[in-house]
Image: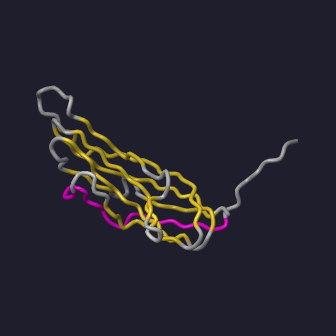
Amino acid sequence: MGTSSSIQIVGQGYAELPAVVDLAATGTGVWVNTGLQLTLPAAGTYHLDANVRSVLTASDGTNAWIGARLFDVTAGVVVPDSEVLVQQIDTSVSPATTVVTQGTNQHASILVPYSVPGSRLVRLQAVKTFSGPAPSVARIQSDGSGRTTLRYERVA
């Protein structure tokens, strides 16, 4: 009979986005801090995961998307490989009639290992990028229809 290996969880933490993050007023390509953050309490290796819910509305002639990433505030760096495309609406190739995609909701997940030499503050950031007319609605939110969350498990 073979042996199985398992990961032992040494500690864990969980947080939910405390308020809607409205990206409508931000320029294209500008990363915005959200209120969603966790403190990794000590040196070690962590499994970080986030579930990100976005809402995006775009009209004819727009290619717009919302992205998210994890940012290590303490070190001032993006958590490697944490960038994710949450949602994209491309109406730039639509017919001549006006197309409006109203309040489309999407979710995306971030799943990354992260090793740190000491305690770190990790925060979710979001970005809206577009060509053509600016989207009228672009936001990250969390409610009973879908949560935006951040979690860690310390495994070493």
Considering depth in this image, is 9 or 81 the residue closer to the camera? 81
Residue located farthest toward the left when viewing the structure as drawn: 97
Which percent across, then down, holds residue 111?
52, 51
Residue at 23% in and 45% down: 130
**Quadrant the C terminus occupies:** bottom right
Q: Where is 142 relative to 88, above or below? A: below
Which percent across, then down, holds residue 85?
38, 45
Residue 24 inside the magenta-drawn segment: yes
Residue at 83% in and 47% down: 3
On the picture, is 91 further left or further right than 41? left
Residue located farthest toward the top when viewing the structure as drawn: 95
**Quadrant the N terminus occupies:** top right
Residue 50 inside the magenta-drawn segment: no
Which percent across, then down, holds residue 114?
56, 59
Rendered image quadrant of residue 94: top left
Rendered image quadrant of residue 2: top right
On the picture, is 68 further left or further right than 2? left
On the picture, is 45 further left or further right than 107? right
Q: What stretch is highlighted in magenta?
A: 10-26
Which percent across, then down, holds residue 6?
73, 53
How many dots with numbers?
A: 0
